[in-house]
Image (tube, coloured by chain):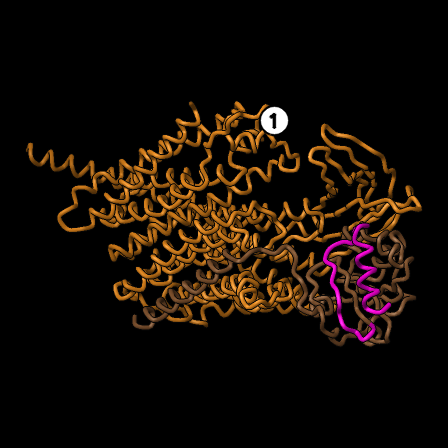
Chain colours: A orange, B brown
Amino acid sequence: MMAELGLAALWLAAALAGLQLLAGFLALRPGHEAVGVLARPAALVQALLCGLSFLVLLYLFAVTDLSVKLVATNSHSDKPMIFKLSGAFGNHEGSMLLWVTVMALAGGLIAAVEKRLPERTMLATLGAQAFVALGFYAFLLLSSNPFERLSPAPAQGSGLNPLLQDIGLAFHPPTLYFGYVGLSVAFSFVVGALLTRQVTPEFARVMRPWILGAWVLLTIGITAGSYWAYYELGWGGWWFWDPVENAALMPWLAATALLHSASVLAARDALRAWTVLLGVVAFSMSMVGTFLVRSGILTSVHAFAVDPERGTFILALLAIYIGGALVLFALRAGTVAEGERFALLSREGALVVNNVALSAILGIVLLGTLYPLLTEAFDVRVSVGPPYFNPVSAIFFLPMLLVLAVGPLLNWRRDSFARIRLPVLILSGIGAGVLVGVWLATDIGILPLLGLSLAAVVAVASVLPLKGRKLARVPLAMWGMVMAHLGVAVALFGMAADTAFQQERLVAANVGDVIEVGPWTARLESVLPVSGPNWQAIEASLTVRQGQGRVTMTHPQARVFWSPPTETSEVALVTRWNGQLYAALGNQAEDGRWQVRLWWKPFVTWIWYGGLLIALGGALALLGRLWVDIRRRVAMRKIAARRADQVERGTTA
Amino acid sequence: MRRLRIFLWVLVGVTALAFGLFAYQLRQPKDEFVASAMVGKPIPPFDLRPAVEGQPGLSSADLADGKPRLVNIFASWCLPCRAEAPQLEALREQGAEIVGIAIRDRPEDVAAFLAVYGNPFTRIGADDISEVQLSLGSSGVPETFVVDGKGVIVYQHIGDIRAEHVPNILAKLREAGA
């Protein structure tokens, strides 16, 4: 019964999306304005129905209803409750339902609270949102029904894979999905504004919180994914330019550019066409990413269930939305007026340079990811990896950081070099000093060298906008910018330091041997078998010590799970403020010695601290914007009340 | 405005082309193994430095001295390479001469690998950037090529050599003139 209830709610929600689409778009035609009143209620009820449908799915997983195919294939009655629940969206069908649900909730929220835009633009936006949602409803209901029954029901579920019982893995995909949905909302706003020819600063202000929210979640998702690959895959790397990683990076790059461009539009009424284009591109990249990952069209180290039918479906959606939006933009290009002009040396100018650089990096990553697909069509097989991505993206990334350092110091519209000469000189001095100092003291590659120098420049530059301000009066949004830019410096420093200074030792050691790597000494104390609830392992005990610091005991394992039989390497990490010691236990040689692999990774953790700082900065900016908005609403209401009061008194007097 | 419009139409065109490519590739069968286009062709010239101390490196000239050989693409970091080590040993015992190409590896790692899993190789070249591997048309490790005495690739085995593959590989080597 419950499964049918969930399915019925989902069909009803889809029907309401159809109604919302018709009401939103029909009302744009002269003489049909009246139907517009249906759009907002349709969005609200749709959100409720979708929410209900998702709750039903959670319930089915909570009680392990094995007559539902999705539960039977992905769950097991012995799983801990938290993994039963996360299992509901840890698979293709469930995650698509989550996607649609979040989209519907976002639509409901816009319909309920957003009143700043002209009503026509709002209706067009809600119509566009329903149009996008309908595609996903169709995908879900026609090719990925999560509520499909299984008859006869099996006695037990088959989803007890211990490797997937990881809390990080349970919440990583939804985080990215939420980000993608946020970008879909921005996309709907763009289409709405194009349809009604209302690309205005107000439109950018309304759209901005959604971009910020999406961007924060994408940042967290990418940071967490990078850390997961680092400790779980056991290769000691933190970015592999794998297609699946690129699929998450590309929307992030576009969202970063969109965020900055929307800020210019909101503050200065410039960059209208850019903002519209980036709004389309950002959501397109989320869809292209999902397509590449889910269709199996590219081979990747991340194995996903591959299904060409679903791939075709997503491709059709891609063609409709992206193609449709681009054609609409091309047709309306004449109506997106140019906006305010500005000098090259201005805040806007710096943001344009950064947007161009971000777009160029996006293009480079996209080309590198798709290139094997292109050559394959001509029967030439290539693989594109770090030797392409690292230097080619650095060509744009490094100059972009220079502009990032100076941009926030510039005034809007027009500025003079004389005004910022002093800070620029100081920053150049710091950059040159670090560059020469590190170059003389060490022997490292050119990219990490530039990275270290620029990290110092950006770190100092990021706090310069606070100079001469009363800290208590600095708006939250500005704190957000400062923190995010500082995060870029911190992450860059971590990347450069780890690349330049990491050290690795692979030794065959007897118990009692001492291994040195970088400033660390490690002693292999024992190697003993241990067992857990569903695994057995060989566990090494290492006492490790950095210089004369405190002694820490650490335990890397080579673990074997029984069902399904899987071998994993459980690496041991010893974290200090200045980096991580990464230890992995390998096989035993015939002479009885154990393979022990030790990495000393200076400041590697700063990569993820930096990522989190960036996300935190975005969250602060979001809070700041919402706070200002709420205060403005309260003030407007008070003014309106006072006016009404005066009018009333005026009439009675 | 005109320029923006032209740019957008170009973008629409490029997007359409990309989608066409996607659609085409979706319909293509995904082959799990990528057979080398080099089978039947002479080995491209190369010259690799020794991968470990005390054993010579490998050049294309070494493969064209009249004697057919197995060229094994391996790496110390590759798990299936460990699994196939006993089979390589068996091939060597049955008279196959095997030369190795170590992919993206370091001398000390290769030495440690050989110390643990045995050394069936007469020569080992170090291919630090997978250059020779790619020129042979090999897309992964391990792979094994049968090369005849004139330096022509006659057979390619993709993946680790299991016990049941050994007779076939020996037969191919014999066909090549051993």
Tell me: A316 left or right of A581: left
Q: Residue A404, position in %: x, y?
A: 50, 62
User: Quick check: is A144 in the magenta stretch?
Assistant: no
Q: Secondary structure at mark 1?
A: loop
Q: Is residue A340 left or right of residue A212?
A: left
Q: Is residue A586 above or below residue A331?
A: above
**Residue A430 visible in this rendered orientation of the protein:** no
Q: Chain of mark 1?
A: A
At horizontal 30% and vertical 70% (from top left) the residue drawn is: B1
Q: Which quadrant does the C terminus of chain A fall into?
A: top left
Drawn side of residue A275 relative to residue B161, left or right: left
Locate residue A470, reporting x and y percent.
45, 50
Q: Nearer the viewer, residue A616 or A413?
A: A616
Q: Name the residue tied to disc 1.
A: A80
Q: How many marks?
A: 1
Q: Is residue B150 magenta?
A: yes
> From the viewer's perspective, is residue A238 above or below residue A35?
below
Tell me residue B101's x, y (percent): 80, 64
- Which image quadrant for residue A19? top left
Residue A332 appears in the picture as rendered: yes
Residue at 88% x, 49% y is: A508
Q: Label 1 is placed on what type of residue?
A: Pro
Magenta highlight range: B149-178
Depicted A502 relative to depicted A125: above or below: below
Q: Nearer the viewer, residue A501 or A251?
A: A251
